């Protein structure tokens, strides 16, 4: 008689927020794969649902509780369904989540998700475990290893976590902890594994990635620049990027790498937040607007075609109209290819949370003016690409027959017509047109 084979359990993960959460979700899926789970893109089919949360934006926790309300009918229909909250809201709320949301079976912080399989087992046994510790062990090394699946052409690789900057508006030091850098040899090993599985472009991640200071195999401390140079030696890895950086950690060797390492792409996300020295001081950024501008000059001195993106907060407590005009002046001086712009929102527990906030009408008006300027610069940057030859790493088919979509060296989305290339190929393309958020091109 043939033994019956039970169907694999299904895991649905919904990821909020930054690229680091995307990376963490992939690692959690692999860890649960070692416990017999396969991923599904339908919550209705899942035996376990994980919400990997972000705490950066306003009302982050309330959005999670709202999502849990939508999931409640699934739990009522299937009492065996397990629901877990992971990520930064889990870290910030902890036991409070279990109190407010009876449908939740487990809560795991961003530093302890390597313990997720045993927590799931405890939940199956009737417990409601919560783990928001900051353990000494390296979670990446202790993650259970699931099946080695093939990968798409691009991947994220977390090299550093946490932040010691304590900007007055930011919750990251409280939810992700102090800065920790992963050992370089482990990162090189993981990068080689990704390349063997089909990855051709790796984006190095960290809350303060250019503050990377991991132990190298030679016993010395490696900078991010040293790590980039070593990664560039991996055969089959064609492109390297990194995000997110702090201006104060843009070291001489990293600036030099932008001019010397061919695989390091000419794109840099370098947040400044404000162009006003008064506001920057109130934010505890520990740099001036002029420092930032001189840094951009140095970077463009070694890589003239460098595309820059940034982060801006408008309406920080105490920001005057003159302060905001200084931000607009900085934006005009830098000429960004893109930027993320936000109205200030108080994050509980941060130093700025107790300060008086500006009226919503002021915040809305300033955000609109800043976004209009950024959009104008983005449009000009993309139109300047028309007629140029660029490298495009093909990622997927486009919507039109014969069309493929990929990213340029400068991280522009490019729709390539009459393209026979397959995902994972790096091709040369001439840009033929510019749309609001993408470029069009033809294979050379």
Image (cartoon, rainbow, N blue to C red):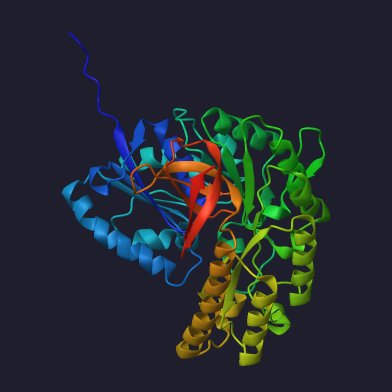
Residue at the image position 60 percent from the left and 63 percent from the top: 384
- Report the front residue among 82 and 334: 334
Above or below 356: residue 225 = above
The reply, left or right, for residue 81 in relation to residue 151 is left
Q: Quadrant of the C terminus?
A: top right
Residue at x 23% of width, y 57% of height:
72
Whether 322 is drawn above or below 250: the answer is below
**Picture layout, residue 136 above or below residue 18:** above
- Let me know if residue 212 appears in the view: yes
Quarter of the rendering containing residue 166: bottom right
Q: Residue at x 65, y 37 (%)?
A: 187
Q: Is residue 92 left or right of residue 173?
A: left
Q: In the image, residue 408 lies at what x, y percent?
A: 56, 50
Place of residue 348 in the rendered image (x, y in percent of width and height, measured from the top left): 52, 73
Is 206 positioned to the left or the right of 229 in the image?
A: left
* Residue 163 sits in quarter: bottom right
Quarter in which the N terminus is drawn = top left
Q: Who is closer to the viewer here, 385 or 60?
A: 385
**Residue 108: x, y in percent?**
46, 50
Q: Position of residue 437 (x, y in %)?
A: 47, 62
Classify 125 as above or below 321: above
Disc tally is 0
In the rendered image, the residue lying farthest to the top is 1
- Res 136 visible: no
- Residue drawn at x 73%, y 37% as measured from the top left: 230
């Amino acid at each position: 008689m043939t033994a019956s084979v039970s169907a694999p359990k299904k895991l649905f993960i919904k990821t909020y927020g930054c690229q680091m959460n995307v990376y963490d979700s992939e690692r959690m899926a692999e860890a649960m794969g070692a416990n017999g789970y396969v991923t599904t893109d339908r919550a209705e089919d899942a035996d376990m649902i994980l919400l990997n949360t972000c705490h950066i934006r306003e009302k982050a926790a309330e959005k999670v509780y709202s999502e849990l309300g939508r999931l409640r009918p699934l739990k009522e229909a299937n009492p065996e369904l397990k629901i877990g909250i992971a990520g930064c809201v889990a870290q910030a709320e902890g036991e409070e989540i279990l109190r407010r949301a009876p449908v939740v079976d487990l809560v795991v912080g961003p530093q302890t998700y390597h313990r997720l399989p045993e927590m799931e087992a405890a939940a199956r046994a009737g417990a409601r475990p919560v783990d928001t510790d900051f353990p000494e062990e390296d979670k990446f090394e202790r993650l259970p290893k699931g099946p080695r699946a093939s990968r798409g052409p691009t991947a994220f690789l977390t090299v550093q976590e946490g932040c010691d900057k304590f900007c007055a508006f930011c919750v990251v030091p409280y939810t992700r902890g102090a800065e920790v850098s992963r050992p370089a040899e482990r990162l090189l090993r993981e990068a080689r594994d990704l390349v063997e599985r089909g990855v051709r472009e790796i984006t190095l991640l960290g809350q303060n990635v250019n503050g990377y200071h991991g132990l190298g195999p030679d016993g010395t401390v490696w900078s991010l620049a040293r790590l980039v140079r070593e990664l560039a030696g991996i055969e089959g890895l064609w492109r390297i990027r990194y995000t997110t950086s702090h201006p104060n950690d843009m070291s001489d060797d990293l600036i030099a790498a932008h001019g010397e390492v061919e695989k390091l792409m000419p794109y840099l996300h370098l947040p400044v937040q404000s162009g006003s020295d008064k506001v920057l001081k109130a934010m505890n950024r520990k740099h001036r607007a002029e420092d930032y501008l001189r840094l951009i000059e140095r970077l463009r001195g070694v890589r003239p075609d460098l595309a820059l993106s940034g982060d801006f907060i408008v309406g920080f407590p105490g920001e005057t109209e003159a302060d905001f005009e200084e931000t607009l002046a900085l934006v005009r001086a830098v000429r960004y290819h893109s930027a993320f712009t936000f109205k200030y929102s108080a994050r509980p527990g941060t130093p700025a949370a107790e300060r008086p906030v500006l009226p919503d009408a002021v915040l809305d008006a300033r955000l609109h003016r800043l976004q209009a300027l950024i959009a104008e610069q983005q449009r000009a940057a993309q139109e300047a690409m028309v007629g140029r030859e660029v490298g495009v790493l093909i990622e997927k088919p486009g919507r039109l027959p014969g069309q493929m979509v990929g990213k340029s060296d400068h991280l522009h989305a490019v729709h390539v017509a009459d393209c026979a290339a397959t995902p994972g190929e790096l091709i040369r393309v001439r840009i033929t047109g510019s749309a609001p958020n993408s470029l069009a091109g033809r294979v050379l």
